[in-house]
Every structure is written in structure tokens, then in C-alpha cells.
Image (cartoon, rainbow, N blue to C red):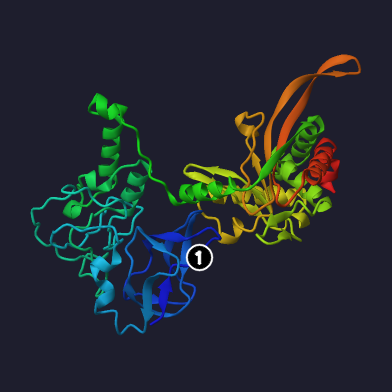
């Protein structure tokens, strides 16, 4: 029987969380069918089947973090779907660190109140930290509940069943608890068979917001690391080992701001609206075309100069940072760059980016101008050779023809990997980028 394994869905991915099964044991599976959702360090993605047959075994419970290459399920001809077999040993499907307490096994029942969750039996093993010793579950045996399916009848043969002592918790409730730093084992469930549901977590959150004592009020809040934050921390730590330097230029931005306003006015009836960042992305593309040595990355024993310009731009999320990539931006005009930037940013915030849309960048832009930040230095994104930090456009007094006037100015700072680029090369790039931004009509060519 062919195994379905945890795939590598991004260049930084080392493990993924099996977020939700969309197929159950006994279901027919065709090539290309989406059978589960995988949460990676970047987004939630679909897991597609590469074989056809019948889903005979599910080896991993929802919410389990699994390394790349580990089997998740098996597809066969259907002959083995009715018998659980070794793959349905409940303890084998749980995270290694979870230590189930002695408690009779029970089967989850569907919770009708939660509209966003599947109403089928699910293996809701906790993927959080193991329960503290001696706490979290009632040692009094509960009567065994009859199994139910999503139609209210008998459970499908071979469907995964929760192991004894498992924490019964809906996926939505588990996610909300994790986002608020709550230990699921401390939450009392009000659902069927003591299952923890969303309302229970929300009640627990209210309790956290209103501490019962001064000691609790003074205690620090512990926020668990999600996949995005964990990978970001690892990559930025790697970045600190890069020998880098910084170059800052002040841009006279009056013409850039005026061009944006004129374009938006002229194209308003077509629903087109350019951001200042769109113009900056296009300016970087134009300048990189003249300085291919900057469109490069570190290759350990070599320098890689890329033929295509793939511009990454940092997007802030509620739980971290992601860098969507405009692939082959050198072949795209300003309008195409603007539309693609907007679409990628929207899908990044919705967690719907595809792996190829946030990998393969050759140059990155980080813009904090919209937050009123005048100037900053961005952390380089290895193995890229450079990243551009863009500050806010500010009004400053200047002397023009013996008159004091206000001018628009913007500071940009280039962080450079000194292993790839020398100071003079990077300075020439910044000189020409400044010229393009101050004479922006060439952005339309």
C-alpha cells in the first residue's frame, strides 16, 4: 500500500502540523484529491493524493506536528479499511511526548454547535505540552460512549479512535487556546463526553483577562511559538552570522509622490490604485537590471548571480512575518506589479499562499513607512545579498531659489552581505536607485 508522507512544502520547512483530515478511513481517493490540510511555517496548505484507491489507514491525529517524510496515512484497494491493524494503535498516532493517563477510551461525538468544524468523529489528541504530573483529567472512569459517525449512526470501520486519557478538544477550540497561550489540559470541557469546545476556551480566556489574585496579575504571559515565529527566529539568528554593512540615502520624493497621485487620478475610473510601495518595487527592478551583481545570493563556496529578478516584500501577519515573492518582476510593468503585490499580500494574510509564492526571492524590500517610521535597518534574508528598508515620506524645510519651502523626503537603507558585495558596488546601486526614485518617469517605460 502506498504511504502518504509529510511533504516539503517550502524551502524552510522541516516539519508540518496535520491541521485537519478532509477524508476518513474507507473513503475513495483519486489522484489530486485534497485529503488533508497541513499547517507549515508559512501558511495552511492542501495535501493532495498522488495515488488512487481507498484511504485504509490514518496514522496521525489532527493537530500533530510531523517531520518531513513521516507517513501520515495509507492508500490501498479497500480490503484493509475495515480492520484497524497496527496503524490504528492509538498510542502510535500520538506525539511522542504525550503520556496518556489511565482512563477508558471513548469515542468523540459530533458537536452541532460549532458550524466551522466537521461533525464526524475525530481523533482529537492534544498536541500541546504534556499534562502536568497528577493533573488535568478526572481519574474516575466514565461509561464508554457508543461510537457515532457524522450521520449519527455507527462509526465507519477502521476510523481512528482516541486513545485512553486523550484530551477531547475541537480543532477550533485548540487553535484559539494556542493563540492565547492557554494549556488545554487546564480547561474544563462542557461538550459531549467532556469535550472542550470554543465556548469553554472563551470562558477560560475571560478568566485569564480577570486574574483572581495579585500574584496572577504580576505573572508574565507565556505565548507559545507558532510555526511561522519559530522559523523566523531560526532564520534571523542565521542572519546575524552574516557579515553585513548598511548604506542610507535620502530621497527627494516630491516627483515620486506627484506621479503616484497623477496615476491614481487618471486611472480611477478603471479601479486602479497604486501604492508608493508599488513604485519602489518597480524602481528596484529597473536598478537591478543595471546592477545584476546585486541580484545575487551567497552559495557557500560560490556567488550565485540570478538571471531573473524575484522581488520579495515583507508582509506583517498577526502571528509573524512572511515574504511573498513577485517572480520574474523584470518582465512585468508597473500595473502588473501593483496587481500582483496586492493579490499576494491579501492571500498571505489569509494563509493561502502557495510554496512557490514565498520562496526563490533574489532581493527583498521591507517598508515601514506606513507606520510612520522615518528610518530603520532591515535584517538580511539569507541567502540573498541585500535587503532595502524604506521609511516614511516626511515634509522637511529646504532652501529653493533663495526661498524656504517644504519638500517631501524619504530615507532608504540597504543592508548588504559583505561576502557577496563590496561597499563601492553597493554604493553605486544606491546612487542609481536614488536617481530613479527622484526622476520616476522611467518607471513607466
Residue at x-position 63% and y-position 48%: 242
Q: Is residue 12 left or right of residue 148?
A: right
Q: Which residue is mark 1?
A: 8
Q: Quadrant of the N terminus?
A: bottom left
Q: Is residue 223 left or right of residue 435?
A: left
Q: Which structural element holds mark 1?
A: loop
Which quadrant would residue 177 be assigned to in this image? top left
The reply to whether residue 414 is visible in this rendering is: no
The reply to whether residue 84 is visible in this rendering is: yes
Residue at x-position 34% and y-position 32%: 220
Q: Is residue 2 left or right of residue 288?
A: left
Which quadrant would residue 34 be assigned to in this image? bottom left
Residue 89 to residue 197: above or below: below
Which quadrant would residue 428 be assigned to in this image? top right
Q: Where residue 4 sits in the image (x, y, percent)? A: 42, 73
* The one of 202 and 154 positioned closer to us in this rendering: 202
* The one of 286 and 68 positioned closer to us in this rendering: 68
* The one of 276 and 7 positioned closer to us in this rendering: 7
Q: Where residue 229 sits in the image (x, y, percent)? A: 47, 47
Q: Residue furthest right?
A: 401
Q: Where residue 189 sits in the image (x, y, percent)? A: 21, 47
Q: Is residue 238 left or right of residue 60?
A: right
Crowd class of label 1 (few under 14; some 14 to 19; many from 20; radius 10 Å) = some
Total labels: the figure holds 1
Residue at x-position 23% and y-position 44%: 186
Q: Where residue 95 sits in the image (x, y, percent)? A: 31, 61
Residue 71 to residue 405: above or below: below
Amino acid at each position: 500500500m502506498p504511504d502518504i508522507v509529510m511533504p516539503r512544502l517550502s524551502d524552510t520547512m522541516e516539519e508540518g502540523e496535520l491541521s485537519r483530515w478532509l477524508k476518513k478511513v474507507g473513503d475513495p481517493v483519486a489522484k489530486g484529491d485534497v485529503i488533508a490540510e497541513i499547517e507549515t511555517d508559512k501558511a495552511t496548505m492542501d495535501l493532495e493524493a498522488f495515488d488512487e484507491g481507498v484511504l485504509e489507514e490514518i496514522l496521525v491525529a489532527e493537530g500533530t506536528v510531523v517531520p518531513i517524510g513521516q507517513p501520515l496515512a495509507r492508500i490501498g484497494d479497500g480490503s484493509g479499511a475495515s480492520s484497524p491493524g497496527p496503524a490504528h494503535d492509538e498510542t502510535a498516532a500520538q506525539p511522542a511526548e504525550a503520556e496518556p493517563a489511565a482512563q477508558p477510551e471513548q469515542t468523540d461525538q459530533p458537536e452541532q454547535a460549532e458550524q466551522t468544524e466537521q461533525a464526524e468523529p475525530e481523533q482529537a489528541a492534544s498536541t500541546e505540552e504534556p499534562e502536568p504530573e497528577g493533573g488535568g483529567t478526572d481519574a474516575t472512569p466514565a461509561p464508554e460512549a457508543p461510537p457515532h459517525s457524522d450521520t449519527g449512526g455507527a462509526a465507519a470501520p477502521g476510523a481512528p479512535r482516541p486513545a485512553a486519557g486523550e484530551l477531547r478538544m475541537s480543532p477550533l477550540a485548540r487553535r484559539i487556546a494556542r493563540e492565547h497561550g492557554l494549556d488545554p489540559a487546564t480547561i474544563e470541557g462542557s461538550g459531549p463526553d467532556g469535550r472542550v469546545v470554543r465556548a469553554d476556551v472563551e470562558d477560560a480566556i475571560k478568566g485569564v483577562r480577570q486574574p483572581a489574585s495579585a500574584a496572577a496579575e504580576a505573572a508574565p504571559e507565556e505565548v507559545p511559538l507558532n510555526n511561522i515565529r519559530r522559523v523566523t527566529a531560526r532564520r534571523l539568528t542565521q542572519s546575524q552570522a552574516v557579515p553585513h554593512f548598511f548604506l542610507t540615502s535620502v530621497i527627494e520624493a516630491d516627483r515620486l509622490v506627484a506621479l503616484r497621485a497623477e496615476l491614481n487620478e487618471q486611472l480611477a475610473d478603471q479601479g486602479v490604485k497604486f501604492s508608493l510601495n508599488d513604485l519602489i518595487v518597480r524602481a528596484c527592478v529597473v536598478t537591478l537590471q543595471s546592477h545584476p551583481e546585486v541580484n545575487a545570493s551567497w552559495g557557500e563556496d560560490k556567488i550565485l548571480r540570478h538571471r531573473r529578478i524575484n522581488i520579495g516584500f515583507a508582509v506583517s501577519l498577526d502571528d509573524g512575518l512572511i515574504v511573498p515573492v513577485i517572480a520574474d518582476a523584470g518582465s512585468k510593468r508597473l500595473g502588473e506589479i501593483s496587481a500582483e503585490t496586492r493579490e499576494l499580500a491579501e492571500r498571505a494574510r489569509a494563509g493561502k499562499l502557495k510554496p512557490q509564492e514565498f520562496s526563490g526571492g533574489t532581493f527583498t524590500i521591507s517598508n515601514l513607512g506606513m507606520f510612520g517610521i522615518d528610518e530603520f535597518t532591515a535584517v538580511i534574508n539569507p541567502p540573498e545579498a541585500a535587503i532595502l528598508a524604506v521609511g516614511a515620506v516626511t515634509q522637511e524645510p529646504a532652501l529653493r531659489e533663495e526661498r524656504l519651502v517644504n519638500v517631501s523626503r524619504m530615507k532608504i537603507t540597504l543592508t548588504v552581505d559583505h561576502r557577496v558585495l563590496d561597499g563601492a558596488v553597493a554604493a553605486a546601486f544606491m546612487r542609481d536607485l536614488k536617481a530613479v526614485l527622484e526622476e520616476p518617469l522611467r518607471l513607466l517605460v
